[in-house]
Amino acid sequence: MQKNENNHGDFSRVYERGLSLAEEGNTFTGLDSDDSFRPRSLETTDFSSRRRSVGQMTGMHRQRAIRRGRSIYAPTPSPSFGPKACLKKVHPSQIMHVTDPSSQVLMWKVSALSVLVIKKIYDESVIEPFKVLVTFLSEEKNLVVFVEAGVQKEESIVQDENFSRIRNKMKTFKEGDNISDKVDFIVCLGGDGTLLYASSLFQQGSVPPVMAFSLGSLGFLTPFDFDFYKESINSVLKGNLAVTLRSRLNSHIYTDDKIPNNHHNDDNDMLFGNEHKDPDPPNLKFKCQVLNEVVIDRGPSPFLSNLDLYLDGSHITTVQGDGLIISTPTGSTAYAAAAGASMIHPNVPAIMITPICPHSLSFRPIIIPAGVELKIMVPPDARHTAWVSHDGRNRQEIHKGYAVHITTSIYPVACVCRRDQISDWFDSLGECLHWNIRQRQKAMTTTCAIKNGEPEKIEKE
């Protein structure tokens, strides 16, 4: 037993070593594959204003206010339990090495040469910032600018003669075109819906890093202020900025429950460079990747929706109500939050299951591990069909016997942080959702004591 404990390492030694590194001004990132300690510096500054440019922040990084001494993730648990019990050893291939989110920093293998600019549609107020940004990217930064074909043909852009030369230099594409290997990074001008749309354009392979400027209605996912666009763009091109990896969901809709093994995980083929992946089976009706949520609801039917929910092949429950929301941590602050779910930080590897108006008071939202496979089916005795929507788009009807398979995608969306992964999220909670914002309780103006549950004024002698 002593030999087994030594193989796993002494957790207290690891913890104490992490604290000592924190006192020295370093960040403890845990054990690498060679069991060596590799500290790294981490600088975090406390800013009073959320909407501060990256350029302004760079000059203020000398003011070190907080040093993170431990990983954002929980510490590695001890493998020993009491004097004789321990965890069974597993093969190294079954051990997952996870990078501390606070160490996830954007870098460029080679300099970026192209950029995709996505702007909010049906909003004239975004036209002028769009022109200014594209001119800066094309003229001053010498980047190839990609835009949607419809944007290049907008009347306010076509009629601007001063912008005609820049307009002719822009590269265009249509929704459905594969531009994964043509775009180095993405700039969004709009709100959260603009970023969701940008994510939907990359259904195969990885998504380029995204910088989102707040020019929309809410802006929970758009932390950058356009007033400082030059400093922000320059900082992204230099790299070394924190990024939040926002997980996405794979959704596959089959016309029956006969599914080839691991077909819905075929993005692994692309990850390891296997271009000769198996073709889609004939019973696959629809597939896509979503950033927020997959919603299965009753559609136009007046009846309760009946949905069988399976987790890793085991039947969990039958949903009776208006529907079901399967969301990422990013989506937990969207539709799921309105339906009563908890809000999950995007660095937490999880999937949220939230019922919509369930016909059972005990049916509460639950959080499950990100690595499980969900299956939702319309049972044979259901009174009507159901409908599936993906981030509010691509609505599909599912009939009795259809199966919706949902897993976590291996291709997240790397969103550039204005400050860091923690501060940006809580800033958005306060500014956009007004989370726990209320007038502070006033202090008592006179000295009093509590007697029999009631305040009693103390007379001064």
Image: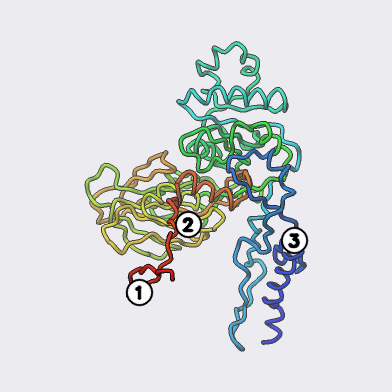
Residue 229, quarter of picture? top right
Label 2 – label 3 distance at C-alpha = 32 Å
Front residue of this view, candidates 55 and 327:
55
Tag 1 secondary structure: strand
Q: Position of residue 86 (x, y in %)?
A: 60, 82
Circles 2 and 3: CB distance less than 8 Å? Answer: no
Residue 451, numbered label: 1
Give the mark nearer the N terminus: 1 vs 2.
Answer: 2
Residue lying at the far front in this picture: please name it.
461
Q: Which residue is mark 3?
A: 26
Q: Nearer the viewer, mark 3 or mark 1?
A: 1
Relative vertical location of residue 339 with respect to residue 175 in this rendering, above or below: below
* Tag 3: amino acid: Asn
Q: Which residue is mark 2?
A: 351
Q: Split into 4 quadrants, where in the image is the C terminus?
A: bottom left
Side (left or right) of 22 relative to 172: right
* Tag 2: amino acid: Ile
The residue shown at (52%, 49%) is 248
Badge 3: how crowded within 10 Å, few (<14), some, or many (20+)? many
